[in-house]
Each structure stands twice: as C-alpha cells, then as structure tokens.
Image: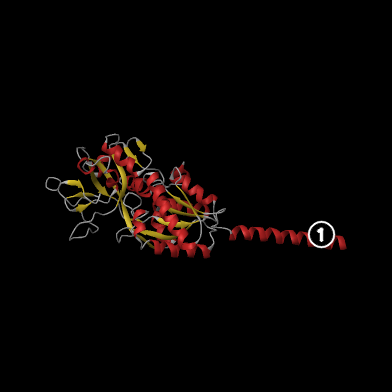
Amino acid sequence: MQKRLLFVLLVVLALMVSVGVAGAQDGDLGSEANPIQVYFVPSVEAQTITTGGEIMAAALEEATGLKFDVFVPTSYAATVEAMCAAPGSSMGFIPAAGYVIANNRCGVEVSAAAVRRGWNVYWAAYIVRRDSDIYTFGDLAGRSWAYPDAGSTSGFIVPSVELQAAGIVTGEGVEAGGHNQVIQAVYSGEADFGTTFFSPPVVPGAPWAIGDLPEPYDLTVDESRIGEDGNLYVGDVQILDARANIRETAPDVIDQVRILRLSEPIPNDTLSFGPDFPPELKAQVMEALYAFAQTEAWGESIGNEDFYNWSGLSPITDQDYDPVRLRFEILGLTEEDIFG
C-alpha cells in the first residue's frame, strides 16, 4: 500500500514538474531564447521587407520589452506552414486568401486588417502593355498570364474566379514570384498580361472613388515622372498601384504598362496570430502596433510604399473574410490546389 502511495505521489510530482516546465516555457515567450516570430509574405522585394520588418520589431521591442524575430519565407505557402508550425509564438502579415487557408488548416486567428489611405479594401488589376492588342476582358483568352504566387489573393485567387466566371481560358501561366516581377514580366513582354494589387491613386482635389477609371489621367497631356519625393506621378496624380514598385529600374513603366480593368473589391491583408498565441501578449503587441502606426517610423516600415503601403490597421473579424471563402467554393479550390 505504501509503495503504491509512493508511486502515485511520484507520478503527481512528475506531472507538476512537467506542467511547471511547460508553464515556464509559455511564460518565456518574447525572451531572447524564445522570441515572437513575425512572418511577412514575399509579395515585394525580400530585402525591403526585412529592413522594414526590423524597424517594426525594434519599435515593438522598445514598447513591450519583448523580443521579436522577423522572417520572410520563400512563398505564401511557406508562410502559412511556418505559422502553423509555431501556433503559440507566431504572428503574420498575410493576405486574405492566405489567412483563409491558415485559419482552415490550423486555426490562425485574424486580429486586424490593413488600412491604405482610408480604404479597408483593395483590388486586383489586370495589366497589359500599352501597345498590346488586348482591349477587353475576353481578349485575355489564350494569352499568357503572369501572376505572383498561387496563394496571392489579388494576384491569383480573385482573378481566377473572375476569369472562370467569364468563361475565359487563358494560355500559359507564369508564376513570377511577386507583384514586382509580374509588372516586370509584362513590361518586358515575357507575358501577355499580368495580375497584381491595385491601390487607388492620389488625385488632387477629387479623391478617387469606386467606379472611377483606374488611370484618371491622359498620357497625351500628362507626363509620367518620378517626383522630387521619389514617388511616381502622372501629372499631379500619384500612382500607388504595383507599377510604382519598379519605378527605379523602369521609370517609364506607366508609359509602357496600362491597366485593362479592376476586380471586385477584396478585403485587405491581415495581421493574424497563431491559434495558441497567449491572449495577454497578443493584447500587448496589438496596443504597441496601434501606437507604432501613429509614428513616422511606420512610414519606413510596413507603411512604406515599396513595402506593403499600410497607412494603418483596424480591427476586423473572421466573418469579414467569408467572401474570400466563397470565391474558393466557386472555384472548387482546395488548399492543395492553391499551394500544390
């Protein structure tokens, strides 16, 4: 009897020690040994993301006392896999389609969405060369298509739904690796058309509104140029869509690449957390992020026009991404179809 009691006590003690160790590890999140993992999808140049991400990490560390490590995986799929592999220590800036997949796969939870110059939605832009003979949506049939990544919401998922709904079967697909590369592929004639993100231009005196032309200017009158501030303009209109991202290597990008049409509005990119991320630390990180969004350093980080161009972020719920789930259903797409 005494031996049995001793055995039970030893088991209980072992369980207590085990729980204590696990608790210590959980409490250790944000330390040098167990930093919070911050993931960014590689939708633009990886070095730009890394540099801006480190600025964000430094600001968050100063505000919270926690430690953060920045990662830019090689693909959208790898970003989702990384977050699911670290359910209790990861946070990620992932687009709508990636979020829906991550939520379905392992319960990743959205906390906020991007705001870009007051917009909580964005669009996909179908782009072609200005000298192209493609003038209507139907003209895309049989043409080669450059897209960033099969997990890109604006670059692939939404256009796929719209093309299928219109009965348009494209030609060869070219997975370019990012929005910048899509622009470059169309610019250089490597693909007949491409699909990228669209953020509305800044139009002085008459703010762009849904239903306006995606290119509210006349190139026979207005000159495309890089302004003294380093941004891309046509006349006085500032360009904020994906074409602006290659302005340094292709300053004539507007003269060479036009927007054929825009998609329906898409819910903005997300800031999401792993399903087991501690709630109290999540609240602390979110408070610090909202404060960071009010600083000049934000514009050197995720707010930079060459990064993700977020003006800020606002709370959002999982239900807001149901339209994206519906697009998946319309296409009959599974995670394997998107990520392979």
**Neighbour class for label 1 at 10 Å: few (<14), some, many (≥20)?**
few
Choose top left, top right, bottom left or bottom right for residue 296.
bottom left
**Residue 286: horizontal and vertical position, in percent?**
45, 63
Image point (37%, 61%), residue name: 293
Query: As displayed, is residue 66 above or below residue 186?
Result: below
Q: Is residue 212 left or right of residue 73?
A: left
Residue nearer the viewer, 204 or 292:
292
Residue at image coords 39%, 44%: 47
Give the image's coloring scheme. Answer: secondary structure
Q: Secondary structure at mark 1?
A: helix
Query: Which residue, as the protein is rendered here, is positioned at the far right?
Result: 1
Measuring from the top left, give residue 43's x and y in whole percent: 38, 46
Towards the viewer: 245 or 192: 245
Eyeballing the image, is 136 above or below 266?
above
| Residue 300 pos. (x, y %) | 35, 54
The quadrant holding residue 45 is top left
Location of residue 226 in the rendering, given as x and y in whole percent from the top left corner: 22, 47
The quarter of the picture where the N terminus appears is bottom right
Q: Is residue 6 left or right of residue 237?
A: right
**Residue positioned 51% across, 59% down in the render:** 66
Residue 136, relative to residue 208: is it above or below?
above
Q: Nearer the viewer, residue 33 or 158?
A: 33
Q: Residue furthest left?
A: 221
User: Residue extending furthest front?
Assistant: 62
Which residue position is annotated with label 1? 7
Residue 330: in sight, yes or no? no
At 42% from the left edge and 52% from the top edge, which residue is drawn? 53
Q: Is residue 67 visible?
A: yes
Q: How many marks?
A: 1
Residue type, label 1: Phe
